[in-house]
Image (cartoon, rainbow, N blue to C red):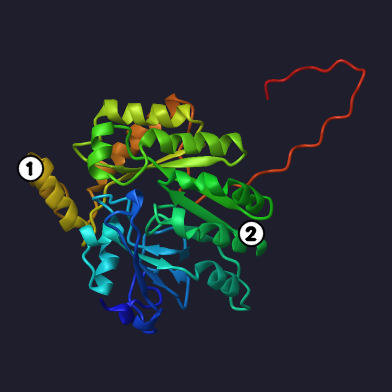
Amino acid sequence: MRWDNLTEGSEHSRADAALFGADAVTTRTFDMPEFRGITFHEVRARSIINRVPAVSRMSFQWTVNPYRGCSHACVYCFARKTHSYLDLDTGLGFDSQIVVKTNAPELLRRQLGSRRWQGEHIAMGTNVDCYQRAEGRYRLMPGIISALRDHANPFSILTKGTLILRDLDLIKQAAEVTDVGVSVSVGFTDQELWRTVEPGTPAPERRLEVVRTLGEHGIGCGVLMAPVIPFLGDRPDQLRATVRAIAACGATSVTPLVLHLRPGAREWFMAWLGQHHPYLVARYERLYAEGSYAPKWYQRRITRQVHELAEEYGIGPTRADLPRRIRPPEPAEPPTSEPTQLSLI
């Protein structure tokens, strides 16, 4: 395992200075049902705020990722390639060999307090899920959110995990002093599809309950409808059922994203496809013949369908990076003895 090759910025790219050395790694396993078959590599990172390369399609510039590898085991996860930087397997190894940056909260607090840090927006959950199963044991996110709150630093969280509700009070506190955006990823509500492509995640309906609960506590929550999986989750009735469920939970927005297959994820997904849906292999090879992304015409078609459904069900598209902030309640109107005219506007 090449720990010295895990370098600053290598969440998305390679750089020079190692984030930590082999002597800083402690490997553990836990004999508990939820962690069976998973190995944790505890490390003390040297840097935690990562710059997104300029060539990236991401709309944000900075990320914090307390974990590497993900027990959600989504067969399409684009972050699988990052495991190869450590000579770890990008298939089952990505699902079961989890790197834990145990000093992430204290390191983030120190970096946020640096004169060089300009207080820019930090995105979390963009590489692997910060509320995956490991977070239940290591509890890194409360310290991370507390540091962001104390420095009034804007941030956003994208997750498939229900564990985010544990930190609801901290998120509310942060939203009182800075811009906070929360999105939950639900690409489909089809139960059979969920069980096979996202076997380690909470069920879609449980994720949508997270959206509902956040909204009830004043945290406007959008849904990233991702991924829309060609030929398996893109039928009109499937799209309708998903958007209907998203609307019913009170989501503030729905943003569709078609499956993309980057190197590392592509090989693993195509192997899964050949095992479970071999009749689709040739269709995928044609659809993704030009690279990691589906053709523009296909992406536009899905986006149009989802946006039309969203309008029908009373929700609208928004930019995925748009933060939301809890606003203080409006002051009560002084009592008056004069009759008032009710208005619909």
Real-space CA distance between mark 1 and mark 2, rounded to the nearest whole angstrom? 49 Å
Picture disc at residue 11: none
* Residues marked 1 and 2 touching at CB (< 8 Å): no
Q: Is residue 336 left or right of residue 35?
A: right
Q: Secondary structure at mark 2?
A: helix
How far from the left and from the top, in percent, is residue 63?
A: 46, 64
Image quadrant where one finds the C terminus: top right
Q: Secondary structure at mark 1?
A: helix
How far from the left and from the top, in percent, is residue 139?
A: 50, 58
Q: Residue at x 18, y 37 (%)?
A: 231
In the rendered structure, which amino acid carries the disc numbered 1? Pro
In the rendered structure, which amino acid carries the disc numbered 2? Arg
For residue 31, which quarter of the picture?
Answer: bottom left
Q: Earlier in the sequence, mark 1 or mark 2?
A: 2
Identity of the residue furthest to the right in this view: 337
For residue 214, which quarter of the picture?
Answer: top right
How far from the left and from the top, in percent, is residue 162?
A: 45, 43
How far from the left and from the top, in percent, is residue 295?
A: 22, 48
Image quadrant where one finds the N terminus: bottom left
Picture disc at residue 149: 2
Residue 323 in sight in this render: no
Q: Residue at x 27, y 78 (%)?
A: 2
Dot 1 alpha-carbon crowd within 10 angstroms: few under 14, some 14 to 19, many 20 or more: few
Dot 2 alpha-carbon crowd within 10 angstroms: few under 14, some 14 to 19, many 20 or more: many
Q: Is residue 141 above or below residue 9?
A: above
**Of residues 190 and 293, the one drawn nearer to the viewer in this rendering:** 190
Q: Is residue 292 left or right of residue 8?
A: left
Q: Is residue 13 above or below residue 142?
A: below
Q: Residue at x 50, y 61 (%)?
A: 140
Picture disc at residue 278: 1
Residue 80 in sight in this render: yes
Q: Residue at x 20, y 36 (%)?
A: 232
